[in-house]
Image: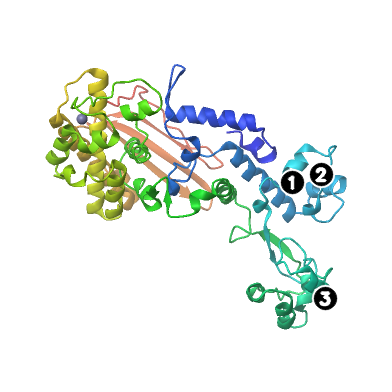
């Protein structure tokens, strides 16, 4: 991603759209130029995970969020060479906000200073003496014009509201000028007691007052899709469910599959027909009814046999009043992944759904005979493997560094890789070393690298042909 260009220049919309298209094509997969079906809209995919998307970024919005950082850099460093140069040449006013661009002005300057999204330019004042904050400043609280005129404060500053001797608010004046709720907020603002402390404007949307690109992107996205934040449900599913999907400890390909299932966007015959693609309508597993998501995963005799035969012993006939989306949503709402037992249950449900889908594809594309027992065995095997991997990785994270040196002697392993890392805070050097050996102890290769001033001594590689069979 061209980050430097994105942070300094306004990238044309066509280029951003092209970059979006490349990302989209990569995500959905491509096969020697053949365009794959994109069954979920890009707008949905770009939503955060907690609102039904997967959090991919739109390039035009990233550009918007990054370029506004330059505005705040200048705002916070008005004495910098950059700020002084641009202000002398293009902006006669002291305030960057009063800048009115003319056609002959610098295009870069215009894209930096003129907001594409006004909320990104919103600031909050850190009050020193108050002399540099006009009462009509857009980032100060707005009082009705006629009240300001009545009190001869049309050209006043916040200093007029402050008792400079005691460094406290003039309570009566504040209450006279502003709405009670606003006055209450102003009176809670701290005033610096340091003499001659200058007023400073900070970014409104972060606690520290510093501009954060990540937060700015969230704001721009929120402004673009306000409907997605109106309630606790997005795309018909509770936001809590969208969040919980990604907490289940399973490979990402299975979580992506469940996410697509909840969006109703798996390419079953019903979905393809709705998109104008001519295919058979009969379920490939039972050849009796039309294939839909509800039928394939819940109502089909094949699926019912799998669910009943699994260790979950689920009778799907009890939940025929629910669609598959509602059923999965209910499962996720009733089972919090933070509970290990519930986590196991969700892992089992997701793996079974994934196995049914894989078996359906094998029957469709490779002509296999439908066999519920095969699905059960595959599902059980996958579940055992995934639980073993994810549970062991969790144990590894919680254990000490010494555990990294532990040698696994499982018979399935063909080689053992050890990694050790170290940081020297005094010399500010860090580095890591690695060693791969066969189970019998003979070396395959060793090496290391460092991030300090002096390079780490690299050990020689004894064998570059690394066998990974069995890993
Ligand atoms: Zn069927």
Q: Residue furthest top?
A: 32
Label whose residue precedes the other's in the sequence (2 or 1) = 2
Q: Quadrant of residue 418?
A: top left
Q: Tell me the residue at 58%/61% (across/down).
A: 207
Where is ligand 1, by quadrant? top left
Front-most of 156 and 26?
156
> Which residue is label 3 attached to?
150
Q: Tell me the residue at 19%/20% (across/down).
A: 368
Residue 383 x %, y %: 22, 39
> Which residue is label 1 attached to?
114
Give SS at disc 3: helix
Q: Pointer 2 and pointer 1: residues touching (CB < 8 Å)?
A: yes
Residue 20 x %, y %: 54, 32
Q: Tell me the residue at 17%/40% (across/down).
A: 307
Residue 101's disc number: 2
Q: Quadrant of residue 28?
A: top left
The CA distance from mark 1 to mark 3 is 34 Å
Label whose residue precedes the other's in the sequence (2 or 3) = 2
Residue 67 x %, y %: 67, 43
Mark 1 or mark 3, whichever is nearer to me: 3
Compared across the picture, whether 49 is left or right of 244 comes to right
Label whose residue precedes the other's in the sequence (1 or 3) = 1
Q: Tell me the residue at 84%/68% (across/down).
A: 155
Residue neighbourhood size for the residue with mark 1, other residues' Cα within 10 Å, grouped as few (<14), some (14–19), many (≥20)? some
Front-most of 188 and 286?
286
């Amino acid at each position: 991603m061209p980050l430097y260009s994105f942070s300094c220049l306004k990238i044309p919309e066509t280029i951003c759209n092209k970059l979006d298209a490349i990302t989209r094509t990569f995500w959905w997969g491509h096969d020697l130029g053949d365009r794959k079906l994109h069954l979920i809209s890009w707008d949905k995919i770009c939503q955060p995970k907690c609102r039904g998307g997967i959090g991919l970024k739109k390039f035009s919005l990233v550009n918007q969020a990054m370029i506004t950082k330059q505005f705040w850099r200048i705002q916070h460093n008005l004495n910098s060479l950059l700020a002084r140069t641009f202000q002398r040449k293009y902006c006669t006013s002291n305030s960057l906000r009063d800048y009115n661009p003319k056609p002959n002005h610098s295009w870069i300057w215009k894209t930096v200073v003129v907001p594409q999204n006004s909320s990104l330019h919103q600031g909050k004042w850190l009050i020193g003496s108050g002399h540099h904050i006009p009462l009509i400043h857009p980032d100060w609280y707005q009082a009705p014009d006629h009240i300001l005129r009545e009190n001869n404060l049309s050209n006043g500053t916040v200093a007029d509201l402050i008792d400079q001797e005691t460094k406290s608010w003039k309570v009566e004046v504040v209450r006279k000028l502003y709405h009670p709720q606003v006055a209450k907020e102003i009176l809670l603002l701290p005033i610096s007691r340091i003499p001659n402390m200058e007023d400073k404007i900070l970014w409104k949307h972060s606690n520290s007052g510093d501009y954060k690109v990540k937060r700015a992107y969230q704001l721009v996205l929120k402004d673009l899709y306000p409907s997605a934040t109106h309630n606790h449900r997005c795309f018909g599913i509770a936001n809590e469910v969208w969040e919980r999907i990604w907490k289940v400890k399973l490979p990402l390909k299975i979580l992506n599959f469940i996410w697509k299932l909840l969006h109703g966007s798996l390419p079953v015959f019903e979905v393809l027909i709705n998109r104008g693609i001519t295919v058979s309508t009969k379920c490939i597993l039972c050849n009796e009814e039309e294939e839909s998501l509800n039928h394939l995963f819940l109502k089909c005799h094949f699926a019912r046999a799998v669910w009943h035969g699994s260790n979950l012993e689920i009778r799907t006939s009890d939940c025929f009043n629910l669609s598959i989306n509602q059923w999965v949503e209910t499962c996720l709402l009733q089972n919090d992944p933070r509970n290990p037992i519930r986590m196991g249950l969700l892992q089992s449900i997701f793996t079974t759904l994934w196995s049914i889908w894989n078996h359906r594809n094998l029957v469709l594309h490779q002509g296999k005979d439908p066999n519920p027992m095969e699905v059960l065995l595959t599902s059980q095997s996958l579940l055992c493997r995934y639980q073993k991997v994810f549970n062991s990785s969790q144990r590894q994270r919680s254990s000490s560094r010494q555990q990294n040196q532990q040698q696994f002697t499982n018979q399935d392993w063909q080689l053992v890789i050890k990694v050790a890392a170290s940081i020297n805070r005094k010399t500010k050097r860090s580095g890591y070393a690695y060693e791969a050996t066969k189970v019998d102890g003979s070396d395959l290769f060793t090496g290391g690298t460092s991030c300090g001033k002096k390079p780490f001594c690299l050990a020689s590689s004894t064998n570059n042909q690394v066998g990974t069979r069995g890993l």
